[in-house]
Image (cartoon, coloured by chain):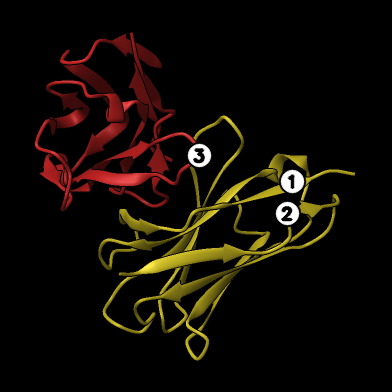
Chain colours: A red, B yellow
Amino acid sequence: DIQMTQSPSSVSASVGDRVTITCRASQVLDTSWLAWYQQTPGKAPKLLIYATSKLESGVPSRFSGSGSGTGFTLAISSLQPEDVATYYCQQANTHPVTFGGGTKVEMK
Amino acid sequence: QLQLQESGPGLMKPSETLSLTCTVSGGSITNGFYYWGWIRQPPGKGLEWIGNIDYSGHTYYNPSLKSRVTISVDTSKNHFSLNLVSVTAADTAIYYCSKTRGYSVSDFFASWGQGTLVTVSS
């Protein structure tokens, strides 16, 4: 299985700050098969970004994704209170699909 | 708007068989080419994909669970189901049903149910 490692495990930032989360895969991924999810407390995950950099419909433009090979990044350009959540990366390059361990984003 | 809703027992004993159903509303399971899947999340932990099924019954399972898992679909009831045999405390988790974004064996999960907590305890 492809292992997905996220860093940091948690981050604390202020409103308006730029936040970046990294996801590293144990094998090279096609950029078409990397996604990011947002999970707010008590809720199901929500697909934010797919194919490394494509925003799902309705996702604010302050979210962006980038990367290639084994390294991928989710960025929030200006953190808002509603962005407090845990974020997960997921690879769909190879069966079985696997998720990163999550990054918790908190407000200072 | 598509909605998915999980249903099933909240509390189980070790060695029992877990059975969950995901009822789809606001759209037909047979409409378009998608997979319908199950994903679980132990309390306070990360996400684990269990398996997917399409409307014609083609299934794909996580090898780590394959020996214990069966996913089935009932298009007449617009729902699909998960059976997991011989549960242990390690199967305690929130179980989510989902719909993939596309029609790939490995794909992203674009729609999710609210999740149902299943606790395995003697």
> Which residue carries the number 1 mark?
B119
Residue B76: where, in percent of width, then height? 50, 91
Q: Spatial distance from mark 2 to mark 3, Cα to Cα? A: 16 Å
Circle 1 Cα neighbour tier, 10 Å, few/some/many (<14 / 14–19 / ≥20): many
Residues A59 and B80: in front is A59
Q: Earlier in the sequence, mark 2 or mark 1?
A: 2
> Which residue carries the number 3 mark?
A42
- For residue B107, the mark is none
Q: Are marks 2 and 3 on the same chain?
A: no
Asked whether the beta carbons under mark 1 and mark 3 sit within 8 Å of each other, the answer is: no
> What amino acid type is highlighted by mark number 2?
Gly
Question: Which chain is disc 3 placed on?
Answer: A
> What amino acid type is highlighted by mark number 3?
Gly
Q: Spatial distance from mark 2 to mark 1, Cα to Cα? A: 6 Å
Quarter holding residue B35: bottom left
Q: Secondary structure at mark 3?
A: loop
Residue A50: where, in percent of width, then height? 20, 46
Q: Is residue B8 above or below residue A23?
A: below
> Which residue carries the number 2 mark?
B10
Q: Quadrant of the N terminus of chain B?
A: bottom left
Q: Secondary structure at mark 1?
A: strand
Question: Which chain is disc 2 placed on?
Answer: B
Q: Quadrant of the C terminus of chain B?
A: top right
Circle 3 Cα neighbour tier, 10 Å, few/some/many (<14 / 14–19 / ≥20): few
Q: Secondary structure at mark 2?
A: loop
A15 relative position to A84: left or right: left
